[in-house]
Image (cartoon, rainbow, N blue to C red):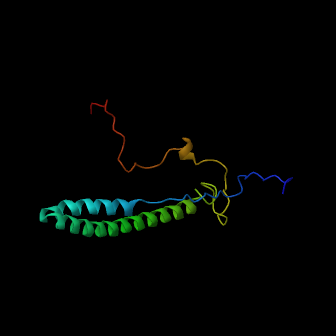
Amino acid sequence: MKGEKEKPQGKDKPREKEKPQSHSHMVEAGTLAGEIVGAVIGSAAGPVGAVAGMVIGGVTGDLAGHILDDDAKRKAEHDEELDKAIGVTGGNLGEAKPGSPPARVGAPSGASSGVSTPSGTPAEGPMQDIDDDG
């Protein structure tokens, strides 16, 4: 309606990322590369071999391009699922899940703030003093 304004999206509302329209050129590149390689290899048998090599290479390249394109789509879908799971696209990044217990103290840990020191020897071994002559 004319008089209504769109409400701005606040921190409490999850962000929805628009899905970009992507077009992979793997199929076209595979077909072209297959035709070129087929023509070069087939040219050893003359003009007929070059034409046959282009056809066979084009079909093989097209198949390889489809496989690469499908793999790229599958990886993109997997990345999208991971982004949604950690809150990059479907929530607030780093926000606790709704069923998580509340924090007991609203402060960072002592070790991360530099107040306390870890006990025991670090995994990489004790610190060496290079000035020590012993």
Of 84 and 42, the residue lying toward us? 42
Residue 96 in picture, x, y percent from top left: 63, 59
Look at the picture and state if 92 lies above or below 127. Answer: below
Total of numbered circles in the picture? Answer: 0
Residue 62 in picture, x, y percent from top left: 34, 67
Name the residue furthest right. 3
In the rendered view of the protein, which quadrant contains the C terminus? top left
Of 25 and 83, the residue lying toward us? 25
Q: Residue at x 22, y 69 (%)?
A: 52
Residue 101 in picture, x, y percent from top left: 66, 63
Of 133 and 62, the residue lying toward us? 62
In the rendered structure, the answer to whether residue 127 lies left or right of residue 102 reads left
Name the residue furthest front. 47
Of 37 and 18, the residue lying toward us? 37
| Quarter occupied by residue 61 | bottom left
Q: Residue at x 84, y 54 (%)?
A: 4
Q: Residue at x 62, y 60 (%)?
A: 90
Q: Residue at x 29, y 69 (%)?
A: 60
In the rendered structure, the answer to whether residue 1 lies left or right of residue 56 reads right
Residue 34 in picture, x, y percent from top left: 28, 63
In the rendered view of the protein, which quadrant contains the N terminus? bottom right
Look at the picture and state if 32 lies above or below 125. Answer: below
| Quarter occupied by residue 21 | bottom right
